[in-house]
Amino acid sequence: QEPMDESGLDPNDIETVMTQVNCSRNKAVKALKENDGDLINAIISAS
């Protein structure tokens, strides 16, 4: 699977979503992008 474009996202936020939701990096990046980098909403939407 192709890695997603992580430009504009904080790598720490990506790691946090992955840890909180126990999901893949791509899913975490997608959730953050869909929520304009909002960490809380990204965690909610990815879970």
Image (spheres, rainbow, N blue to C red):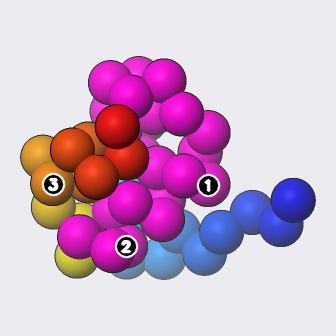
Count of numbered labels shown in the rendering: 3
Question: Which badge, 3 or 2, comes first in the chain's sequence?
Answer: 2
Mark 1: give few (<14), some (14-19) or many (20+) Cα within 10 Å: some
- Give the answer, above or below, for where 47 lies relative to 29: above
Residue nearest the observer in this picture, 28 or 6? 28
Q: Mark 2 belongs to which amino acid?
A: Lys
Residue 9: quarter of image: bottom left
Residue for point 37% across, 73% down = 33
Q: Position of residue 27 (x, y in %)?
A: 54, 52
Front disc: 3 or 2: 3
Question: Which badge, 2 or 1, comes first in the chain's sequence?
Answer: 1
- Give the answer, above or below, for where 45 lies relative to 43: below
Q: Mark 1 belongs to which amino acid?
A: Asn
Dot 1 corresponds to which residue?
26
Mark 3: give few (<14), some (14-19) or many (20+) Cα within 10 Å: some
Q: Is 24 positioned to the left or the right of 1 in the image?
A: left
- Find the distance from the CA under tag 3 to the CA under tag 1: 16 Å
Q: Is most of the magenta stretch helix, strand or loop? A: helix
Residue for point 21% across, 44% down = 44
Name of the residue lying farthest toward the right: 1
Residue for point 48% across, 76% down = 7
Q: Position of residue 13 (x, y in %)?
A: 31, 46
Dot 3 corresponds to which residue?
41
- Give the answer, above or below, for where 14 lies relative to 36: above
Reply yes or no: does residue 2 show up in magenta: no
Q: Are marks 3 and 1 in contact (CB under 8 Å)?
A: no
Residue nearest the observer in this picture, 44 or 32? 44
Residue 43: quarter of image: top left
Dot 2 corresponds to which residue?
33
Q: Is 10 positioned to the left or the right of 29 in the image?
A: left
Magenta segment, which residues? 14-35
Quadrant holding the C terminus? top left
